Each structure stands twice: as C-alpha cells, then as structure tokens.
C-alpha cells in the first residue's frame, strides 16, 4: 500500500490520459500516471524509425506464422515488421469474442497515440444535436459551444494542418498550413461541388507540424518531414503523440509521477466515505498488488479497458460495477468502415505529384444533417485519394524490349480510392461484459465482446456505395469496383461509449463534466464517455473533453468540492 495521497491519479498514458496528466500537472496537481505497459521514451525508443525496407529481415512484411498466430491484429493496416512492437499481439492478451470483434490495442506509454493516422476533425453542432432530434441514444448534456474553446486549446498545442474551409458541418479550428490536393483530387473535388450542393471535399486536417509555432518548439518538436513512417514513432516530433508532447510537458512541471508496468485492476470505492479513494494495481512483471490513493481519478485506459475497469470495480454500494446503477455500463458503439471503392481515371496524364503526404481528401457527413430525411439514422464521412498507377503495373503489348521500356517511362492512369467512416447507433445489444470463469495473466476477468452490425448499418453502407459510385462516375472515373469488406466491428478502432454522458442518471453514467453521476470524484474522459459516435475521427474530441474535465476537476478541488 502506498501511503501517499496524490491529488489525482490518471489511468492510462495514451492520447486522452496524456492530456489529463498535462492539464492537471500544469495546474499544480500532484499527479500519478499509471500505465500498464512499458515506457516508450520519445526518440530513444523508436527502434525502426530510420530503417530502410532492406534493413528488415522480412522486408517489412510479416512472416506467415505471426499472422496465423495473431489474426486479429494482423488485420490492422498499420501492423507490420516496422511497428509490431507497439501493438498488442492476440496471443498476449486474449479476450472472448461472442461475436467476431477485432480489438486493436497498444499497451505502452503513449498507447495508440504512437500508432494513429492523425486525422482530426471537430464535431459540429449537428452531431451533438442528432440523438435528441432523431431519437437515438440519449441527449448529449453538452453542445458544440461548450467544447469549442477546448478544441482550440488542444489544437494550438498539438498542431494541426488544415484550411479554414468555412463549413457548417465541419467547424474550422486553429490551423497550420494545409497539405495540398493533387490534380486528380482537385478535379474530383470540383466535380462533386458542381454536382451536389451539400457535399464539400476538403484536404484532410491532420495533427502534423507543417510550420511549427513557438509552443511546438518548446515541446522539442520540429517540422513534419513527410516521411510517412509515422507509426514507427517520429523522432522529429512531426506528428502529435503523447510521447512527444503531453507527457514530457507534464514531466517538466515536476508534478508528474509516471508509473509503468502498472496494470490497474480496479478502482477502490470506500463505502463509508461514499467516494473513491484510489486504485488497485498489479505489477505487470512481479504480479505484486499495490493500492494507490488520490482525491480524484481520471479513467483513460481507452474505451474497452475503461469499461472493463469500471465493471471490475465492485463494492457493496456498486455490486455491478462502479457507477453502474442503471445497468447500462458496457453498451458500446463503433465506426463502420466496411464500404470502399476503387476506380480509374485516364485524364490529367501530364500531372504528377511530388513527395509523400500524411493525409488524404475528406468530405464531412452530408446525410441526415439538417433534418432526418434518409431511411437510416446517422451519417458517414468520406475519405478519398488519387495516385498515379505504379511503375511496376502491367502494361499492354509486348512485355520486353524497347516497347516495354517505353511503356514504363511514363506513369499509368490515375487510381482513385474512396472509403467511408460510418456512424453506428448505440443499442442495447452491442455490449461488453466480464467473463465469470476466464481470467487474464493478472487474475483480471477477461472481456467478452458481443457486438454486431444491424439493418441500419447495412442501409447506411449501401447508401455510401451508391453515392460514392455516382460521385466518381460524374467525375469521369471508370472501372469502379465497390466493395463491402464485411470486416468485423472493432477494426475501425474507433470504439466508443459504455459509460455515456447524459443529464439523467437513470439513462447515463456520466454528467456533463464527465463525473460518474454516482461518484463524483471519478472522471471518465476517453471514448467510453461518448453518448453517440458521430462520423468524425474521434481523438480530437476525446482530448478536448479531457482538457475540459481536467480543468473543471481542478477548479472543484480548489473550491474544496472534491
Ligand atoms: C492504426 C490506427 C489508426 C488510427 N487513426 C486515427 C485517426 O486518424 N484519427 C483519430 O482520431 N483516431 C485514430 N485512431 C484512434 C486513436 O489512436 C484512439 O482514438 C486514441 O488513441 C484513444 O485514446 P485513449 O487515451 O482513449 O486510448 P489509448 O491511446 O489507447 O491509451 C490507453 C492507454 O491505457 C493503457 N491501459 C489500458 N488498460 C490499462 C490498465 N488496466 N491499467 C493501466 N493502463 C491501462 C494502455 O496501455 C494505453 O497506454 C487510430 C488508431 C490506430 C491504432
């Protein structure tokens, strides 16, 4: 048992936990950051960052035995020989799939912030209003105006490249210079804008330093080199990760204690005091148990692990899990990534592009925005990009001699790729719960995932496939192949909910400040708090919600309310 009482304990050092630690430490709070994985120091612990393909034993491909032993994580596009050390292998941390579910995890300091694709968009007022208007989930207890300033606060610090596009469906933020679309992307953008009043493709906004400002230099970060090797960890600090930014910033305050290899088993509720007093931790390596104490707890273990920890935090007062008076804990939702398409365009033969780019074109949701007028609930965001076909493509005619050389001296037609990021509607059946008979290596119950698509998801998917094809046809694309990958939920990685925010304790777990309704000194500010899913990449919203809640917690502690 640790005797010390911290001001705050933050569980999980990933994207949202890093932000909780930064805000709390900056405000003078003595903060313990607990991370179940090993330490990953910025720069020092990116072993593959400067490797070339030929430096890898398998040329950056995975040997078959690894993919066969780890089918779930192998389905993630970013998992490879250069990045495998930042991913959880299926064999290391088993869970029980009642229905197929791909749980993609990163257990180390920085969590998945090392691995993310860095696409960031603010939610608009429409996402916060949709559940109430269209009758799903419960009403959000906050609106866009409650969080707009916190978006700015986060954006300025992490650095985001983008254009001020002036769209009501995608509010502008604090931007560094944008990346550029290539000629074909501009052509498709123009065609979509000409043909549809409600559709606005823009260059993707991403957490990259295209022109670092003083605040980024103070973090020791530099300009993005457009190497597109980001998931290996960026020694330049060109993209935002907790490792390069929030955690070292919190450390500089001398208020942070980072404890790695600390697997949080549960949050300790004191029945007599009527509040939480600390957390129980099992050492990853020695399996020793230690209790740590604090005035407030921030739960940021990523959606499913935060649900797991709450479900496993049982007491006389909370026999079904901490804060779970209404039995709604564990009901989750996710993004639907099943739809995509490829196409060819034979125009713009004289156009090419140079270098790499860490983003693509995106188009904010245009379905059920101003009113609910489609046969499904929710919407979808679209991402697309265009590239010239590779030099190694199959060319027509003789495959040797001068013709072959001649054919290969020019790049091929344009290839276009388009995909959807669809919203799923939270529903009772989609849930996670604890196994009653299977535990992990640390004696913690394994998580059972019981999550699936429904009819709404199928109709929404078909709408994207029809609309996407039509948009590409109108832009003059040919050979359009639409695809339903039928991938299991989870591979989208944007899993959210389970401890949703709401005004009513009967139908939600958290209040508008992310405090458990039933236990105010516990704040849940990762994806588990999300009342609905929206169509945007979610991490920016997790970070803004976390910063807002952390500042509220500090104010409440200063007033003596916590
Ligand atoms: C390949 C990939 C691409 C992505 N692309 C995007 C994108 O473009 N845009 C976007 O917005 N999001 C993207 N994401 C998702 C993004 O990474 C997550 O939304 C974000 O990291 C979630 O932050 P978090 O703090 O909730 O969780 P994490 O960053 O996963 O951090 C959780 C931390 O908690 C720790 N932890 C878990 N359980 C315990 C425990 N019991 N005790 C102690 N510590 C614990 C974990 O080890 C981890 O370090 C992507 C993710 C991946 C993997």
Image (tube, grey):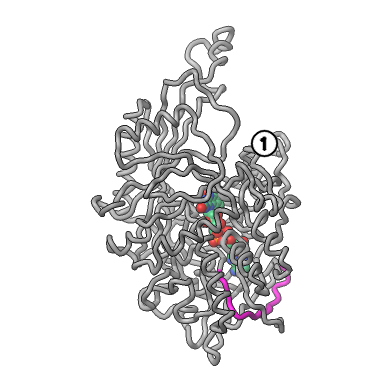
**Residue positioned most to the right:** 44
Q: Is residue 290 magenta?
A: yes
Q: Is residue 345 magenta?
A: no
In the image shown, does 484 or 359 lie closer to the viewer? 359
Q: Residue at x 36, y 76 (%)?
A: 504
**Residue positioned most to the front:** 214
On the image, the x and y values in percent for residue 441 come to: 63, 68
On the image, the x and y values in percent for residue 232 come to: 66, 46
Q: Is residue 512 left or right of residue 252?
A: left
Q: Residue at x 28, y 52 (%)?
A: 370
> Crowding near pointer 1: few (<14 within 10 Å), some, many (20+)?
few
In the image shown, does 209 or 451 lie closer to the viewer? 209
Q: Is residue 145 left or right of residue 211?
A: left
Q: Is residue 345 left or right of residue 109?
A: left
Q: Residue at x 35, y 34 (%)?
A: 192
Q: Residue at x 67, y 56 (%)?
A: 243
On the image, the x and y values in percent for residue 553 come to: 55, 74
On the image, the x and y values in percent for residue 236 come to: 69, 45
Compared to residue 492, the image places residue 143 above or below, namely: below
Q: Which residue is mark 1?
A: 59
Main secondary structure along the magenta-highlighted residues? strand
Quadrant of ligand 1 in image: bottom right
**Residue positioned most to the top:** 402
Give the secondary structure at mark 1. Answer: loop
Q: Is residue 525 at all visible to an observer of this figure?
A: yes
- Which residues fall within the magenta stretch? 285-299
**Quadrant showing the N terminus:** bottom right
């Amino acid at each position: 048992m640790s005797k010390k009482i911290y001001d705050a304990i933050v569980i999980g050092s990933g994207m949202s936990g890093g932000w909780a630690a930064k805000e709390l430490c900056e405000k003078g709070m003595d903060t313990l950051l607990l991370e179940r994985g090993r330490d990953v120091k910025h720069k020092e612990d990116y072993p593959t960052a400067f490797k070339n393909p030929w430096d890898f034993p398998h040329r950056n491909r995975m040997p078959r035995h690894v993919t066969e032993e780890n089918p779930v994580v192998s389905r993630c596009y970013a998992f490879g020989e250069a990045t495998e050390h930042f991913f959880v292998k299926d064999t290391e941390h088993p869970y029980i799939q009642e229905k197929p579910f791909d749980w993609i995890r990163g257990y180390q300091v920085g969590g998945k912030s090392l691995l993310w694709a860095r696409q960031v968009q603010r939610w608009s007022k429409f996402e916060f209003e949709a559940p109430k208007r269209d009758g799903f989930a419960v009403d959000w207890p906050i609106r866009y105006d409650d969080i707009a300033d916190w978006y700015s606060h986060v954006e300025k610090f992490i650095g985001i490249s983008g254009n001020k596009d002036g769209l009501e469906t995608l509010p502008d933020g604090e931007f560094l210079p944008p990346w550029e679309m290539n000629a074909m992307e501009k052509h498709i953008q123009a065609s979509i804008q000409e043909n549809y009043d409600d559709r606005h493709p823009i260059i993707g906004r991403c957490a990259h330093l295209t022109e670092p400002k003083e605040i980024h230099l103070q973090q020791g970060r530099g300009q993005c080199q457009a190497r597109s090797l980001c998931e290996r960890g960026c020694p330049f600090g060109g993209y935002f990760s907790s490792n390069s930014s929030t955690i070292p910033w919190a450390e500089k305050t001398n208020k942070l204690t980072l404890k790695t290899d600390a697997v949080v088993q549960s949050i300790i509720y004191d029945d007599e005091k009527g509040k939480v007093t600390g957390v129980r931790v099992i050492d990853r390596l020695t399996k020793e148990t230690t209790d740590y104490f604090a005035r407030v707890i921030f739960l940021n273990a990523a959606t499913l692990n935060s649900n797991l920890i709450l479900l496993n935090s049982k007491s006389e007062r909370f026999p079904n899990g901490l804060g779970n008076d209404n039995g709604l804990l564990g009901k989750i939702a996710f993004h639907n990534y099943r739809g995509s398409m490829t196409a060819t365009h034979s125009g713009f033969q004289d156009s090419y592009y140079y270098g790499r780019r860490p983003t693509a074109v995106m188009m904010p949701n245009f379905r059920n925005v101003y009113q609910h007028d489609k046969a499904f609930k929710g919407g979808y965001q679209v991402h697309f990009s265009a590239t010239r076909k590779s030099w190694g493509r199959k060319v027509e005619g003789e495959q040797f001699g001068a013709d072959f050389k001649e054919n290969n001296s020019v790049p091929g037609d344009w290839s276009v790729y388009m995909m959807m990021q669809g919203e799923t509607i939270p529903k009772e059946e989609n849930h996670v719960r604890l196994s009653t008979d299977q535990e992990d290596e640390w004696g913690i119950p394994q998580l059972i995932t019981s999550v699936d698509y429904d009819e709404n998801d199928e109709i929404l998917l078909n709408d994207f496939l029809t609309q996407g094809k039509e948009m590409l046809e109108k832009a003059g694309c040919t050979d359009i192949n639409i695809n339903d990958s039928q991938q299991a939920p989870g591979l989208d990685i944007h899993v959210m909910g389970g401890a949703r925010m709401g005004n009513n304790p009967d139908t939600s777990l958290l209040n508008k400040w992310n405090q458990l309704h039933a236990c105010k000194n516990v704040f849940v500010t990762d994806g588990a708090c999300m009342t609905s899913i929206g169509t945007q990449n979610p991490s920016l919203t997790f970070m803004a919600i976390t910063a807002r809640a952390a500042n509220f917690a500090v104010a409440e502690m200063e007033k003596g309310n916590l």
